[in-house]
């Protein structure tokens, strides 16, 4: 080169994919797949449990920050994104325990779990019977 020359360099920030998903019975608000520039933040995403379930936590997997792999913050915003990330909202069924006691013949102990009622009943003519009732 024998004279001054003007050059233009164009730089683009690398962007990363942050994908939100669910495990269990629930829904997510906002955009579940987001393209985030290096060092940027996701938009807040809320996890809402469906009837009969509850939200437990988010789990984050991928390379690089954030270093926290689980959190119960809801809604969730991930800051300083520096790698592709998978974020999963975990929901579990509600559990109930029902104990019923009676004296003499009739109902014994009962246990209600995961919206299913299992009842043991003694019947003097037919021995012990087990009934499973759904939708309780």
Image: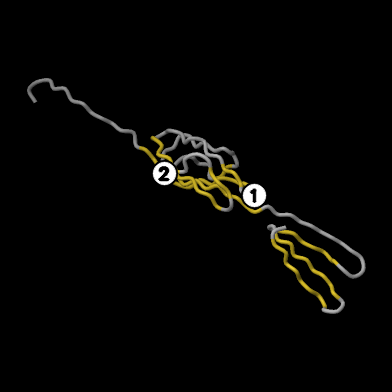
Residues 7 and 57: in front is: 57
Q: Is residue 95 above or below residue 43?
A: below
Q: Total of numbered circles in the picture?
A: 2
Residue 135 image position (x, y, % from top left): 69, 59
Q: Residue at x 60, y 42 (%)?
A: 72
x and y, in percent, of residue 44 in the image: 52, 36
Numbered disc 1: secondary structure: loop
From the viewer's perspective, tell me whether residue 131 is left or right of residue 59: right
- Write the residue at 47% across / 36% down: 42
Q: Are marks 2 and 1 in contact (CB under 8 Å)?
A: no
Q: Residues within 10 Å of mark 2 (few under 14, many from 20)?
A: some
Cα separation between marks 2 and 1: 32 Å
Q: From this view, report whether residue 27 is shown above or below residue 7.
A: below
Camera-side residue: 50 or 21? 50
Q: Depth check: give the residue in front, 16 or 34.
A: 34
Instruction: Say whether residue 70 is left or right of residue 113.
Output: left
Which label sits in the foreground, 2 or 1?
1
Q: Earlier in the sequence, mark 2 or mark 1?
A: 1
Q: Position of residue 41 (x, y in %)?
A: 46, 34
Q: Which residue is mark 1?
A: 51
Work out whether residue 14 or residue 136 is closer to the camera in this orientation and state it: 136
Residue closest to the far left: 2
Image point 49% across, 40% down: which residue? 66
- Residue found farthest to the right: 104
| Left or right: where 7 falls relative to 128 | left
Instruction: Return the x and y of residue 82 as percentages of the image width and height.
Output: 41, 38
Where is the N terminus found, in terms of image quarters?
top left
The residue pinned by badge 2 equals 84
The answer to whether residue 119 is left or right of residue 54 is right
């Amino acid at each position: 080169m024998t004279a001054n020359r003007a050059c233009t360099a164009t730089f683009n920030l690398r962007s990363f994919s942050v994908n939100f998903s669910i495990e269990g019975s629930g829904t997510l608000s906002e955009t579940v797949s987001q393209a985030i520039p290096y060092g940027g933040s996701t938009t807040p995403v809320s996890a809402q449990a469906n009837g009969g379930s509850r939200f437990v936590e988010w789990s984050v997997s991928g390379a690089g920050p954030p270093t926290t792999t689980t959190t119960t913050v809801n809604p969730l915003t991930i800051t300083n994104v520096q790698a592709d990330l998978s974020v999963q909202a975990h929901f579990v069924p509600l559990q109930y325990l029902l104990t019923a006691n009676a004296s003499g013949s009739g109902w014994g102990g009962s246990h209600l779990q995961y919206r299913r009622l299992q009842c043991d009943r003694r019947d003097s003519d037919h021995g012990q019977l087990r009934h499973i009732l759904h939708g309780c």
